[in-house]
Image (tube, rainbow, N blue to C red):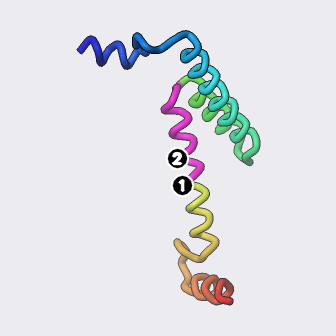
Amino acid sequence: MTALRNFLFLKIITVDTIHYWILVASWVVLVLLGLWSLASTPRGRMLRVFWAAAIIFLPGAGLFAYVATCLIHADWEVLRQMGFFSKTKKKIVRSISVSEP
């Protein structure tokens, strides 16, 4: 149990100070890229504040949730543009006929 606790809290004998700084630098880069992505997407102000707080204050979980949401939203929009999830079949037929060479 002690070995697991030491691993989870990064109290490993072979981990040197430079490894901690590399982990910190990697984390800062991930958070900054997440915030940059958030700033470059067209979202409402309150939604941006929510995601920024989640990214900063929920380490790991906030970034994972933001990435998952972005991927699901992007895939959903692509499928919607292709005609799926629509009430009429005309859009599906039109998207298939347009995509054929």
Do the residues under discs 1 and 2 have CB atoms within 8 angstroms? yes
Question: Quarter of the image containing the C terminus?
Answer: bottom right
Q: Is residue 34 above or below residue 58?
A: below
Q: Is residue 65 magenta?
A: yes
Name the disc covering residue 72, or none. Answer: 1
Classify residue 100 by image quadrant: bottom right
In screen coordinates, is 91 left or right of 64? right
Q: Decide: few, some or many residues near mark 2? Use Cα within 10 Å; few <14, some 14-19, many ≥20.
A: few
Q: In which quarter of the view is residue 26 placed?
A: top right
- Residue 46: x and y in percent read 67, 35
Q: Which mark is residue 68?
A: 2
Label 1 residue SS: helix
What amino acid is at disc 1? Ile
| Residue 29 rendering spot, x and y as whole percentages | 67, 29
Residue span colored magenta: 58-71
Determine which quarter of the picture holds residue 66: top right
Residue 54 showing in the rendered view:
yes
Of the pair 19 and 83, the residue shown nearer to us: 19
Instruction: Count all numbered tags in the image, as a single digit.
Output: 2
How packed mark 1 is, by other alpha carbons closer than 10 Å (few <14, some 14-19, many 20 or more), is few
Residue drawn 55% across the image and 10% down it: 17
